[in-house]
Image (cartoon, helix red, strand yellow):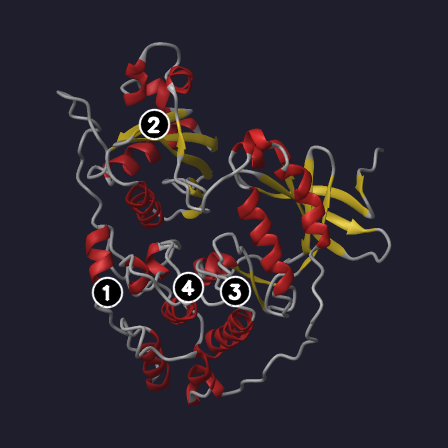
Amino acid sequence: MVVRKVGKYEIGRTIGEGTFAKVKFAQNTETGESVAMKVLDRSAILKHKMVEQIKREITIMKLVRHPHVVRLHEVLASRTKIYIILEYITGGELFDKIAHRGRLSEVEARTYFQQLIDGVEFCHSKGVYHRDLKPENLLLDSQGNLKISDFGLSAQPPEGVSLLKTTCGTPNYVAPEVLNHKGYDGALADIWSCGIILYVLMAGYLPFDELELTTLYSKIANAEFSFPSWFSMGAKSLIKRILDPNPQSRIRMEDIKDDEWFKKDYTPVSYIEYEDVNLDDINAVFDETENQQEYQQHGDDDAGPLILNAFDLIILSQGLNLQSLFDKGKDSVKHQTRFVSQKPEKVVLSSMEVVAQSMGFKTHIRNYKMRIEGLSANKTGNITVILEVFEVAPTFLLVDIQRVAGDPNEYLNFYKNFCENLDDIIWKPPNDSGVSRIGKNKMGRKRPLP
């Protein structure tokens, strides 16, 4: 039996897989400690211009060493791979707990919320704003304690910068000021997301949940939501102060911790403050990568989708027959599909995310790529889909969709339903009626989370 090792870590089974990385179970042979090893391919990082993003994410995770944040132990590298050694979390996502059990009791919801606030407050004390807080990014350890994960969209603005500009996050959890593109305070935006999470924990569904983006954004902007009958007065009072659409009057972190409902049975977490955070291993890993100029990234971290040239289009369209770009053949749908849009890339991404979530799927967005996964329509198996947005002309985007896992016929059903609900953003060639319209699925606002 061949034992694979990286440094002092013995590598075991694959426990997760994303667009650009695999996560493997590993064990520290010196201490016996179990860890999660995130394995990234150097060439993929360079090709997709992700060096700065990953470097920033690793740096931030080193800074926010707290009991309620997934801990990053160290970073290693070989000639072809980068290895990020993380705390091994065994309890799964908080999202899955809500999906399987429905709403939580007020006592349990409050405990998770207290731990969330402790972790987020610490991040803010380090000048770090998460910007994508949601139950899918909150993990549970073996003791049931909450751990904040996935800092891929987080920001650590330089000193003197008070407002952030980049619009990011999951639409249902995003604060209204983030959506108006006029700049926002990262701390207050995170607080809003924490309020949404508390509501979801206690209700089992989202306070703002509309299929049409314009309706969703309008309700978020005006804080149009209602409480279920089982919410206590204390919980309702605190959530109202958090989900204040005016960031200037929204409750601050210190006032949340001083709230009577919050303080019930609250014990602040104890931890050792690490003053000296060594970033040398990050710099060493990425120095060689950044010197490879043919893939060097320039500009900010929101440079837009990759641009397809004519050769790329020929490959995507199976030779010179561009007709397959518009997916008229049923067989082409079973494995790889695509559509074209003239809407802005942010609108396309947000629309796809809202539609996928309304269909009961989990989503994850990174650098104009989206991963969708969940149960098929007949609940007999899982489907995993990767979508990537490309620019083919200044006013045209191409969305390439690939089935990663799942039955081809179930994927065909998924694709048809998905596109029917995206009818407003899909561009159709002249004299082409596009996907047949069966009628949009009118989802109830207060449906349970998938």
Q: CA distance from mark 1 to mark 2?
A: 33 Å
Q: Is residue 91 visible?
A: no
Q: Amino acid at mark 3?
A: Val
Give the residue pinned by disc 3. Answer: 128
Disc 1 is placed on an element classified as: helix
x and y percentages locating residue 400 in the rendered image = 38, 29
Q: CA distance from mark 4 to mark 3?
A: 31 Å
Give the residue pinned by disc 2. Answer: 338
Tell me which label, 3 or 1, sits earlier in the chain. Answer: 3
* Mark 1 Cα-neighbour bin, 10 Å: few <14, some 14–19, many ≥20: some
Tell me which label, 4 or 1, sits earlier in the chain. Answer: 4
**Marks 4 & 1, CB-CB < 8 Å contact:** no
Q: Nearer the viewer, mark 2 or mark 4?
A: 2
The residue positioned farthest toward the front in the image shown = 160
Give the residue pinned by disc 1. Answer: 221
Where 199 falls versus 331 (above or below)?
below
Q: Which image quadrant for residue 242?
A: bottom left
**Marks 2 & 4, CB-CB < 8 Å contact:** no
Q: Which image quadrant for residue 181?
A: bottom left
Tell whether 126 sits left or right of 113. Answer: right
| Residue in the picture at 40% in, 20% down | 316
Q: Amino acid at mark 2?
A: Arg
409 vs 315, nearest the viewer: 315
Give the residue pinned by disc 4. Answer: 102
